[in-house]
Amino acid sequence: MHKRNFDTAPKDKEQVKYVVVKGALGVKVAEDLFYVLEKEMSIDTPYYLEKDIMQAMLKILQSIIRMLMKEFFFGGSYMKLHEGGTIYTSFQG
């Protein structure tokens, strides 16, 4: 970045906006966001699908599954929680 334009290059401890693009031989390369836009480079779409979108979807699905399992195992009308903390079901005598 300093070689491209010293004046606009980030200074020490300054945040750098970057995106991941495919480099030579499929190597992932982090590039300056504005440089990528200027040169109309293509980003590494599978990287973002796997690292960002899939991870977020997994968290959402895990939460839904946990909620459904709690409802299935502990939320049915056949189960009642006794004041002492004991679970009684309609199957017990």
Image (cartoon, grey):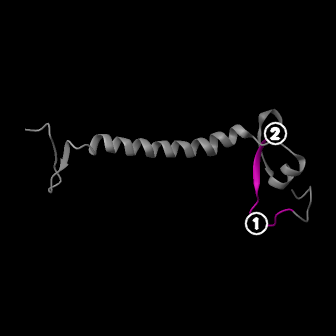
Name the quarter where the N terminus is drawn. bottom right
At mark 2, the secondary structure is loop
Relative to residue 65, is residue 31 drawn left or right? right
Residue tagged 2: 23
- Amino acid type, mark 2: Gly
Label 1 environment density (alpha carbons within 10 Å; few <14, some 14–19, many ≥20): few
Q: Quadrant of residue 24?
A: top right
Q: Residue at x 88, y 64 (%)?
A: 8
- Counting from the top left corner in percent of width and height, residue 93 is at 7, 38
Q: Residue at x 74, y 63 (%)?
A: 15
- Counting from the top left corner in percent of width and height, residue 31 is at 80, 50
In the image, 50 versus 61, the foreground residue is 61
In the image, 48 versus 3, the foreground residue is 48
Is 38 covered by the magenta stretch?
Answer: no
Q: Residue at x 59, y 41 (%)?
A: 54
Residue tagged 1: 14
Main SS class of the magenta portion in the image: loop
- Counting from the top left corner in percent of width and height, residue 64 is at 44, 44
Q: Quadrant of residue 10?
A: bottom right
At mark 1, the secondary structure is loop
Q: How many labels were placed on the picture?
A: 2
Relative to residue 74, is residue 91 drawn left or right? left
Read off the magenta span: 9-23
Q: Residue at x 88, y 59 (%)?
A: 2
- Amino acid type, mark 1: Glu
